[in-house]
Image (tube, rainbow, N blue to C red):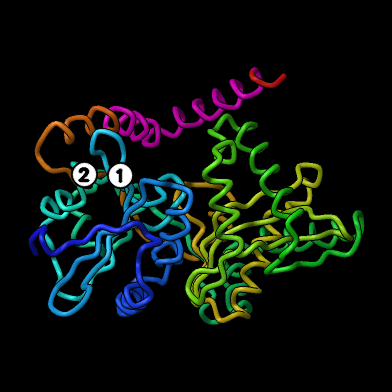
Amino acid sequence: MSSGRVRVLRPEELGEGERERWRELRAATDAPRSPFMEPEFAVAVGRVRPRARVAVLHQGAGPAGFLPYERGPLGRGRAIGLGVSDCQGAVLAPGVTPDPAELLRACSVSSLAFDNLEAGQELFVPYAAEEHATYVIDVEKGYETYESVLRARSPKFLRTTLAKERRLGRRAGPVRFVFDEREPAALRALMEWKSAQYRRTGRRDRFAQEWIVRLVGRLAETRAAQCTGTLSVLYAGDRPVAAHFGLRSATVLACWFPAYDPEFAKYSPGLVLHLRMAEAAAGEGIGLLDMGRGPAAYKDSLKTGELAVYEGAVTRPGVGAALHWMGREPARRAHRFVRARPRVASLASRALKGAARLRRP
């Protein structure tokens, strides 16, 4: 497919017919229906990221594919929402295989970076530098079946978590869970807890970035069949003790920003929250909870399996490709070195936490 068959638009410029075609193409794939791959997510990002674009690929009478992305400085492109999007790639009709270099040229970018490229993205996977695991909870057969899997695999974990839930209720008041909370104060509490967690662990505070705060606010108001912002809250009495904000489609709940009140840490409210989210999701007909990439003890305890995602970049020859390599590859190689050596990774984590403590007033 030549570059002359590509139109580049701002996400909000997509017509309803184009958005519906995007949804049809997405529904026809075998991939889990991640809400990050829907037009509503692209439009929400476009409202807070002025450089967001969608390449609309045409073949015959109508659109045959869509590539959401962002234009960066010096012609460096990136997957739309890079840094917060947990599923990335193009939405293409079967048999549509544009030349990647021509597609980048049509998009006016010399590279296209991704860090959570969806498995099955045959156009871009050959350019991946690394493969990562994203951790999932399968509740397709119902919550009771999931709980029986946990009970068989790690009975102590499930028994201990449920006991902590009961103790939390005795100490702070009856425990209740709201799957789709609409109270703005609960969302503000979640962002405060998450910011504190980022700072406590020495990691970059995503909620210190205005565009991410604005994006979450917009998505909290998004109510579409395949992309709905969902705030889930665990209460003890009238007090929120843990919360999560993510996106859901009809079949996938993308777990995005979980956090809890540190005052209640000994009751593991985050684990209790995830169990209740799995139960509620199954009740809504959702079959998969995607906890995202990156190892964590709580993910190991809750997961039923893993899916592959990819990190890397497509480049076309020129100065832009060299700039991308210099800007990304040294850091990626350093991270890969650390991840491959558990002792070094542990020392790095302790160093981050120590640095965070020193920065506190």
The percent position of residue 331, horizontal first and vertical second, equals 33, 29
Classify mark 2: residues with Cα within 10 Å, few (<14), some (14-19) or many (20+): many
Classify mark 1: residues with Cα within 10 Å, few (<14), some (14-19) or many (20+): many
Does 346 lie within the magenta span? Answer: yes
Q: In this view, does 329 lie above or below 289?
A: above
Q: As drawn, is 99 to the left or to the right of 220?
A: left
Task: Find residue 160 and name its label.
Answer: none
Highlighted range, magenta: 329-358
Real-space CA distance between mark 1 and mark 2, rounded to the nearest whole angstrom: 7 Å
* Residue 56 in view (yes/no): yes
The percent position of residue 308, horizontal first and vertical second, equals 34, 58
* Residue 167 in view (yes/no): no
Residue drawn 59% across the image and 77% down it: 282
Q: As drawn, is 190 to the left or to the right of 15?
A: right
Residue drawn 52% across the image and 73% down it: 224
- Reading the image, the residue beneath label 1 is 71
The percent position of residue 288, horizontal first and vertical second, equals 50, 71
Query: Is there CB contact under 8 Å for labels 1 and 2?
Result: yes
Q: Is residue 172 above or below residue 65?
A: above
Residue drawn 40% across the image and 71% down it: 32
Please, what is the three-letter code of the amino acid marked with disc 2?
Val
Residue drawn 43% across the image and 44% down it: 83
Q: Which image quadrant for residue 111?
A: top left
- Reading the image, the residue beneath label 2 is 109
Q: In this view, does 299 lie above or below 151?
A: above
